[in-house]
Image (cartoon, helix red, strand yellow):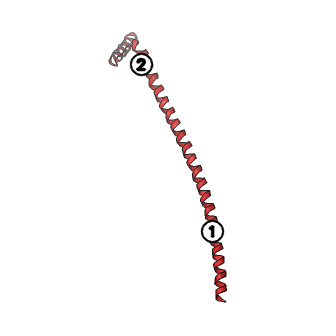
Amino acid sequence: MRSSACGLAEDIQAIESELRGGGPADTGERAYDNVRKAFGVLMEQGEMLATRERLNATHLAILDKLDANHRELLGAMDRQVSRINAVETGLARVDERTRE
């Protein structure tokens, strides 16, 4: 009874192999195809990683430029505040002289 079960399992496996379109000779081609697909996926992931790294580098460069522009604007505003204060001081002096 045990040997007929083994024979039945082998028959089922043979039928399934034929339905899938291959036999023992096809396993090498299927293995090659599976490796090729896996390698393709790895290459895509590597390309995505490289793209992500380029985007990160670009993002950091943009942040550096924004920081530099921010510092430059703050310096320009500080200079303008100093000029406005000087004008206000001069105007206050003129105002005091004209009141006398």
User: Neighbour class for label 1 at 10 Å: few (<14), some, many (≥20)?
Assistant: few
In this view of the protein, which residue sits in the foreground, 1 or 67?
67
Which residue occupies the foreground of this view, 43 or 62? 62
- Which residue appears farthest toward the bottom when viewing the image? 100
Identify which residue is drawn at 61% across, 61% down.
74
Q: Label 1 sits on what residue type? A: Val
Q: Residue at x 61, y 64 (%)?
A: 77
Q: Where is residue 4? Give x, y as percent.
A: 37, 11
Single out the residue that lies furthest toward the top. 3
The residue that appears at 66% across and 77% down in the rendered structure is 90
Residue 38 in the image, given as x and y percentages of width and height: 47, 26
Q: Label 2 sits on what residue type?
A: Arg
Q: How many marks?
A: 2
Instruction: Please give the label number shown on residue 81.
Output: 1
Residue drawn at 64 percent across, 83 percent down:
95
Q: Which mark is residue 30?
A: 2
Image height of 30 relative to 83, above or below: above
Quadrant placement of the N terminus: top left
State the image coordinates of residue 99 (x, y, percent, origin top left). Answer: 64, 88
Q: Residues within 10 Å of mark 2 (few under 14, many from 20)?
A: few
Q: Nearer the viewer, residue 56 or 3?
A: 56
- CA gap, disc 1 to disc 2? 75 Å
Q: Is residue 90 left or right of residue 49?
A: right
1 vs 2, front mark: 1
Work out whether 34 lies above or below 67.
above
Relative horizontal placement of residue 22, taking residue 86 as reference (left or right): left
* Quarter of the rendering containing residue 32: top left
Q: Whole-percent x and y of residue 34?
A: 44, 22
Q: Identify the secondary structure beneath mark 2.
A: helix
Specify which label sits upstream in the sequence, 1 or 2: 2
